[in-house]
Image (tube, rainbow, N blue to C red):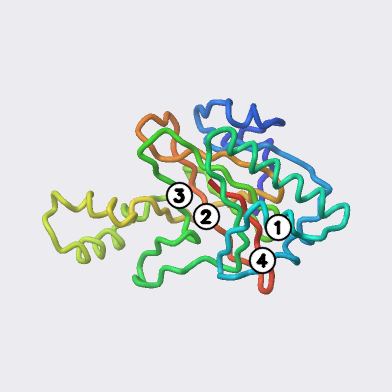
Amino acid sequence: MNNTFSDNNQIGLVSTFPELVNTNFQGAMNAICWHRDWDGDFKEIVSKLQLKDNVTEVFTEDLLALPLSEKGIRAREIILNDLQLLTDFGAQPSLNLLKSYERDEELDFISTDVYSYHVDRSPVSTDTFLCTYHGTASEFLPNDQVEQKTLIPEIREKLKELHDGPEAEFEAFLKEYFFDLHYQPKPNAEPISMGSGHLWRLAVDHPSQKVLPCVHRAPVENDGEYRLLLIC
């Protein structure tokens, strides 16, 4: 399932935060990875945090209150540094302890939750940053290995029935309910795991973006295992 990062022209590999935020997306490259090998114990942090909801935001004071081993302290320093770097950059990072995301089960022919392959959209020039510190990692697909769900004939016909309005307003309807952001893997598609501890920057769909947005999704969680995820 996991392709090698260095063998994929969709991925740009960098070794510092300044490189992560200053490297331009170009051509097929719409995902940039600050590839890191950490020796911190993120599992220890997860084991000592308290899950209040299926998705619980973790704040700096929560991390600082944890009694930790030397490797746990190292892991905490890594997380706090990432949060500070992104905040100083002007982003608004959120650290989440999560059991599971809410599922979209309203329609049986199309899903619009984060477990579905999707792209992020923004009206302004921005990017998505994320890092899985513990648990199953997020994953993405090359753009030539997916098909927009709203272009699949049987799905499109059902969406037209759901719309039940003027044809001229159909595309606006698809955008309003985010149907157009979701993608179906083609046969033999090969998902790429983002791995653990690496900080990623993904291209999003916005007017000034010169590359295709990165198609990604949240993974199905392992039973009994929480994820610790930074995202903004």
Along the polypeptide, which appears first: circle 4 or circle 2? 2
How far separated are the C-alphas under marks 1 and 2?
16 Å
Inter-mark Cα distance, 1 to 3? 27 Å
Q: Mark 1 points at which residue?
A: 134
Where is 112 relative to 127, above or below?
A: below
Q: Is the Cβ of the residue at disc 4 closer than 8 Å to that at disc 1?
A: yes
On screen, residue 104 versus residue 45, left or right, reads left
What residue sits 54% from the left and 54% below the top?
188
Q: Which of marks 1 and 3 is nearer the N terminus?
A: 1
* Mark carried by residue 199: none
**Callout 1 amino acid:** His
Give how far across and how far down residue 8 sits, in percent: 62, 37
Q: Distance between the residues labelled 3 and 2?
A: 12 Å
Amino acid type shown at disc 4:
Tyr
Residue 179 position, x and y percent, is 33, 56
Packing grade of label 3 (10 A; few <14, some 14-19, many >=20) is some
Foreground label between 1 and 3: 1
